[in-house]
Image: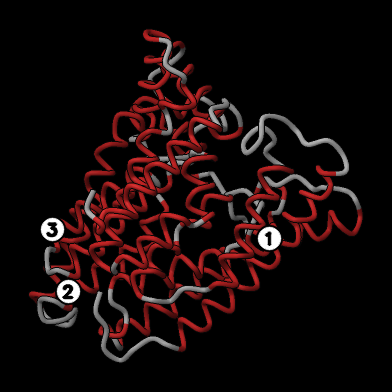
Amino acid sequence: MSHALAPVVAALVLRVLLVLLCDRVVADVLRYHKLASHLLDVSWNPYQAPRLYPYPPVWMFWEAASLGLERLLGLPFAVVVKLPVVAADVAVVELLRRAAGARAAWIYALHPVALLIAAVHGQFDVLALLAVMAAVLALGAGRADRSALWLALAIALKSFPVLLLPFFTLHAAQACGGWRTAAGLRAAARYGALATLPVAAALVPFLFHDAGAVRRELFGYGGIADFGWIGAWRGLRQLATGALARSEAALWPDAVTAGKAAFLLGLAALAVTALRRPAAWPPARAAFVILLGFLGLYGAISAQYLLWPLPFALLIGERSRAWDVAAALALCGFYLFLAPGTLVPSRLPEPWHALAGRAWAVGAAATWLAGVGWLVRALRSAPVQGAS
């Protein structure tokens, strides 16, 4: 084995071991199983299964294939459905090794947040995250069309990466003379079209079949308040009163509206800054700040979103050890307290379960505070000239 590939191999071994140890159909893996059953037994349209599929179409095919393999060959669903997630997480390690060096690759390979979310939780965000990383690196290398298609894949997996589109189109325009020139505007329009039209085309059959279901499930989803400032408040309130409020965004309408407004205002301010100083916001830095800003401002944050800023922080050398520790504590507490069966086979007995709840509550608050500090530091360190 080449010494250079050591972090990649270590990442693969650790993630496979964790998948085999955590091979239970619980939490989001259970949601995948329910959606797959709907696809194979009820309807090909995932949006007709209420509260099961708030994503664009692509991931549904692997959910259905995983259940099909279980039924045909007896392969365990909880293992099979995580295989592309593990492969993508290992690919992130390899991209970091090539783009940022062995140290960055090792940090991600061994990072508790990456291990927990990909191999234990099994959330497929890392597939979209890998596509965004590929888009960032391609755009930095001057391959705008390839970058746009990678971003299209990311958006087709999780709609969340569409937030990056204005900043990436600006970078494409800058490479062709800037957004004030005709060539720059054409480059931006081409990038935007390549990044969005494939996703729109993929949604057309579902919109034609049941547009109301698509609007309800895909466009009506507001998040889960397990992390972010709403999640932190929810956890600390539980510590103070002993009563745990529910996490659905619909139950926090005022707070979610305030979080949306704060994030959109921050995004608009960053866009204005990027228009004035585009060289200060190359794709990797823009992605990192936007993703970290989402965690800090929106509020109704699910566990898997903690993964998003991590590889971009490593790409640009903006790591926060305080956030690393807080996020690892918060996630362990979250899985043990709010998602029993994910990390260990069953619900912990008291008082260990209560201790896990305290770890989640304190960790979620600490993660949010450390993330805000991390964001402020990143904004202050934005260079006049940048490279992706």
Answer with mark 3 or mark 1, whichever residue precedes in sequence: 3
- Any part of residue 136 in sight: yes
Distance CA(mark 3)–CA(mark 2): 12 Å
Please tell me which residue lies in front, 61 or 116. 116
Above or below: residue 187 compared with residue 127: below
Q: Nearer the viewer, mark 3 or mark 1?
A: 1
Kindly report the distance in space between the C-alpha atoms of the residues bearing marks 2 and 1. Answer: 39 Å
Q: Position of residue 135 (x, y in %)?
A: 24, 59
Which residue, given by chain and number where applicable, does mark 1 sit on?
364
Residue found at the very far bottom of the displayed protein: 384
Image position of 214 with respect to 48: above or below: below
* Label 3, label 1: how far apart the Cα atoms are: 39 Å
Q: Is residue 169 left or right of residue 87?
A: left
- Please tell me how crowded label 3 is: few (under 14), some (14-19), or many (20+) other residues with Cα within 10 Å: many
Residue 192 x/y as whole percent: 22, 59
**Which of the pair 135/194 is nearer the observer?**
135
Q: Would you say the residues marked 3 and 1 are in contact, meaning their CB atoms lie under 8 Å apart?
A: no
Pointer 3 residue = 145
Q: Is residue 47 left or right of residue 202?
A: right
Q: Which secondary structure, mark 1?
A: helix
